[in-house]
Image: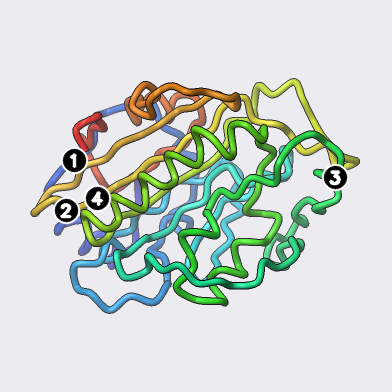
């Protein structure tokens, strides 16, 4: 990524590992790669470096505890990114709110009624279960910009198992960074009056700091029921980059994902 802000260049010097040279989308302005502004006080926080992916749509939306890139064509986020700390892992019995449109999406996020009687779940990208440390954080996950059509057996099955494992890793590493989205560009299925695209695949990338280096694991899972191990769906990050046109960690070079996480 060219022309990063001086603050990001300073942060970049702190990063010890570099990512492989892969095909990426470079048509993104420098303003789009910025640190998330969530509450964090640790000097070793993942937000000491800008970890946001690039955006192919140039519509970045920042909420207090997560950031997303909205794709108006498919009426959903192409990615949602957030930090998950060990101390965020709470089990609060918050009342589940209604889904509402995201007021920060300038083109308008899809109405929840598109999902009604569609046969698909309103699948969270940033899970409500990851945000139970705060009622406000929890409620923010119910913007329709943070959901995507998921088959019920997928949402409650293999995808739920990956989400639970992600929370396990947050406890293990104390502080992780998560990027999630659906791959909808080749979708032949749409729901609702706004024609919300149904992704054929969903991906999730988990990044952790191990000592002075970074490590990551990436998943690519068909939007279908599966009883397979979650590790059967591990893929290289560059596979996801080639499929989406997104550079997921533009300030990390030679970062490789593996099952050894």
Q: Nearer the viewer, mark 3 or mark 1?
A: 3
Crowd tier of the residue under label 1, counting other residues whose Cα lies within 10 Å: few below 14, some 14–19, many 20 or above? some
Q: Earlier in the sequence, mark 3 or mark 1?
A: 1
Q: Nearer the viewer, mark 3 or mark 2?
A: 3
Q: Name the residue under label 4.
A: 208
Which residue lies at the image location 48% right of the left edge and 65% below the top edge?
A: 131
Q: Name the residue under label 1.
A: 18
Element type where label 4 sits in the image: strand
Residue 261 lies in quadrant: top left
Residue 119 lies in quadrant: top right
Per the model, the C-alpha gap separating discs 3 and 4 is 37 Å
Per the model, the C-alpha gap separating discs 3 and 2 is 45 Å
Residue 153 lies in quadrant: top right
Please name whichever residue, 95 or 140, is drawn nearer the observer in this view of the structure. Answer: 95
Per the model, the C-alpha gap separating discs 2 and 4 is 12 Å
- Look at the numbered discs 3 and 4 and tell me whether their residues touch, using CB distance below 8 Å: no
Per the model, the C-alpha gap separating discs 3 and 1 is 44 Å
Q: Name the residue under label 3.
A: 116
Q: How many marks?
A: 4
Which residue lies at the image location 48% right of the left edge and 68% below the top edge?
A: 65
Per the model, the C-alpha gap separating discs 4 and 1 is 14 Å
- Look at the numbered discs 1 and 2 and tell me whether their residues touch, using CB distance below 8 Å: yes
- Residue 238 image point, x, y percent: 35, 27
- Look at the numbered discs 3 and 1 and tell me whether their residues touch, using CB distance below 8 Å: no
Q: Name the residue under label 2.
A: 15
Crowd tier of the residue under label 4, counting other residues whose Cα lies within 10 Å: few below 14, some 14–19, many 20 or above? many
Q: Earlier in the sequence, mark 3 or mark 4?
A: 3
Please name whichever residue, 179 or 8, is drawn nearer the observer in this view of the structure. Answer: 179
Element type where label 1 sits in the image: loop
- Residue 121 image point, x, y percent: 70, 42
Q: Which of marks 3 and 2 is nearer the N terminus?
A: 2
Q: In this view, does 248 lie to the left or right of 261?
A: right
């Amino acid at each position: 990524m060219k022309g990063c802000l001086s603050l990001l260049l300073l942060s970049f010097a702190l990063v010890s590992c570099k990512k492989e040279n892969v095909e990426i989308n470079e048509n993104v302005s420098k303003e789009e790669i910025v640190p998330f502004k969530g509450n964090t006080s640790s000097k070793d926080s993942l937000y000491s470096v800008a970890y946001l992916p690039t955006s192919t749509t140039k519509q970045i939306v920042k909420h207090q505890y997560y950031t997303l890139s909205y794709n108006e064509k498919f009426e959903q986020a192409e990615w949602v990114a957030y930090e998950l700390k060990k101390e965020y892992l709470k089990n609060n019995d918050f009342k589940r709110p209604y889904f509402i449109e995201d007021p920060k999406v300038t083109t308008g996020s899809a109405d929840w009624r598109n999902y009604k009687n569609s046969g698909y779940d309103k699948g969270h990208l940033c899970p409500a279960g990851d945000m139970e440390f705060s009622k406000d954080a929890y409620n923010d996950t119910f913007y329709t910009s943070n959901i995507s059509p998921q088959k019920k057996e997928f949402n409650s099955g293999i995808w739920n198992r990956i989400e639970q494992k992600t929370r396990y890793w947050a406890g293990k590493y104390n502080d992780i960074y998560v990027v999630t989205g659906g791959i909808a560009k080749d979708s032949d299925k749409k729901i609702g009056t706004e024609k919300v695209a149904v992704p054929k695949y969903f991906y999730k990338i988990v990044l952790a700091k191990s000592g002075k280096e970074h490590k990551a694991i990436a998943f690519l899972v068909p939007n279908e029921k599966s009883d397979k191990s979650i590790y059967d769906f591990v893929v290289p990050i560059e596979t996801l980059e080639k499929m989406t046109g997104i550079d997921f960690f533009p300030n990390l070079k030679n970062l490789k994902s593996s099952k050894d996480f």
